[in-house]
Image (spheres, rainbow, N blue to C red):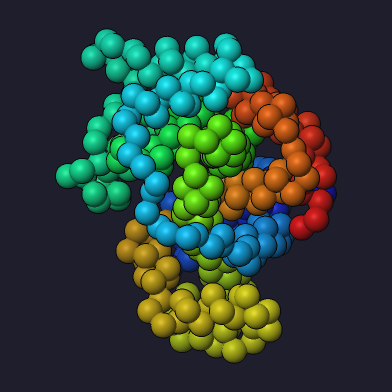
């Protein structure tokens, strides 16, 4: 699989006319698409990302002894653990982390850290880096905070945007595709370091990895459903419950059959698309790619140095997506 195939197959290849037609008619009303430049998209299918999504959906969740964290950890202690881990392999990156965390100018404060208690609705109070580059972290005083801080701060530290002619910012292809991969791989790496240094228990690590995989499997489910809806529309079928049920009857793949049968119970994903008038496939595929690469990194015993190389390319505004995919060829070739 070459870089061009990976990029284009992992979203949807449409010519300009089909692209605009799909925008207008997927659910009978305008749907927002933020795919690649129209001129770079040709008709094809969603085979690569669908295969990756199916692989993620079939991954086995780790059994945990208990779902309770082993101890309480203060937020400052969690920040220091993240610093110590980063400093163990890159002192420059560790200083960058602390400099961003401790910016004190309230007008330009980059990182906002607030207690989760009283802000339990994660849809409203999300751990994230927003479109303006502001970091929001809601802490629980548990080992989970260490993972969350490292995940979100990796996004901030490898932030890289291209300024378009109209003044708007856009991510380069490398960050667009692999931005979540670095953070998800990073979670696994810091978790193992925490266990090896007896800061957290193996069960604490398993709790976080299980939670991450459950979320990624939900993303994989959404990708597979939306891919099928897109293919239905391209084949001339209207997107409705009756036609989806008809499509399900012809599904032979047991994994897809499980997913579509589940969707047919309440049409949750399809109704969400109708309500929001937008697809979530581009965002969802980032987590699928991240989960898959994290799994492959572990299976192939990739090192901190491999992680650093990928993280550098994600944050490199001049990164060449072809070269990055070539570096990851062995991790992607088993699709």
Q: How many marks?
A: 0
Question: Viewer-proximal residue, 22 or 68?
Answer: 68
Left or right: where does residue 179 sit relative to residue 267?
A: right
**Quadrant of the rendered image containing residue 318:** top right
> x%, y% of residue 193?
58, 34
* Residue 69 appears left or right of 218: left
Residue sitting at x 42%, y 70%: 270
Query: Which quadrant: the C terminus?
Result: bottom right
Q: Residue at x 57, y 84 (%)?
A: 248
Query: Could you tell me which residue is drawn at 35 percent across and 34 percent down?
Result: 73
- What x and y, as percent, mark residue 126? 33, 43
Relative to residue 123, is residue 146 depicted above or below?
above
The answer to whether residue 197 of the structure is visible from this angle is yes
Residue 213 versus residue 94 in the image, above or below: below
Q: Nearer the viewer, residue 34 or 267?
A: 267
* Residue 226 in the image: above or below residue 246: above
Residue 133 showing in the rendered view: no
| Residue 164 percent across, percent down from the top left | 51, 24
Q: Residue furthest front?
A: 198
Nearest the viewer among 307 and 241 is 307
Q: State the residue at coordinates (47%, 40%).
A: 200
In the displayed structure, would residue 300 be above or below residue 189? below
Q: Position of residue 233 (x, y in %)?
A: 55, 71
């Amino acid at each position: 699989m070459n870089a061009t195939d990976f990029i284009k197959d992992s979203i949807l290849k449409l010519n300009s006319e089909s692209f605009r037609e799909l925008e207008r008619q997927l659910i009978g009303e305008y749907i927002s698409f933020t795919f690649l430049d129209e001129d770079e998209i040709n008709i094809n299918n969603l085979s690569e990302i669908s295969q990756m999504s199916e692989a993620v959906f079939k991954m086995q969740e780790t059994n945990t002894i208990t779902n309770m964290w082993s101890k309480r950890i203060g937020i400052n202690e969690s920040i220091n653990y993240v610093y110590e881990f980063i400093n163990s392999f890159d002192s420059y990156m560790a200083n960058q982390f602390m400099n961003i965390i401790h910016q004190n100018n309230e007008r330009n404060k980059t990182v906002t850290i607030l207690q989760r208690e009283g802000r339990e609705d994660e849809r409203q109070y999300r751990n994230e880096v927003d479109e303006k580059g502001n970091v929001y972290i809601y802490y629980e005083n548990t080992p989970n905070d260490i993972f969350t801080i490292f995940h979100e701060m990796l996004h901030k530290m490898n932030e890289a945007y291209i300024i378009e002619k109209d003044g708007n910012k856009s991510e380069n292809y490398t960050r667009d595709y692999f931005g979540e991969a670095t953070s998800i791989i990073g979670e696994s790496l810091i978790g193992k370091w925490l266990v090896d240094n007896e800061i957290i228990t193996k069960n604490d690590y398993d709790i976080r990895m299980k939670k991450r995989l459950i979320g990624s499997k939900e993303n994989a489910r959404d990708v597979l459903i939306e891919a099928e809806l897109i293919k239905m529309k391209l084949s001339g079928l209207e997107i409705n419950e009756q036609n989806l049920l008809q499509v399900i009857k012809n599904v032979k793949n047991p994994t897809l059959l499980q997913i579509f049968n589940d969707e047919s119970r309440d049409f949750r994903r399809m109704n969400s698309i109708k309500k929001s008038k937008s697809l979530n496939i581009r965002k969802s595929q980032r987590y699928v790619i991240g989960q898959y690469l994290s799994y492959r990194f572990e299976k192939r015993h990739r090192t901190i140095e491999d992680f650093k190389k990928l993280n550098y390319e994600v944050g490199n505004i001049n990164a060449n997506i072809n070269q990055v995919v070539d570096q990851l060829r062995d991790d992607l070739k088993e699709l």
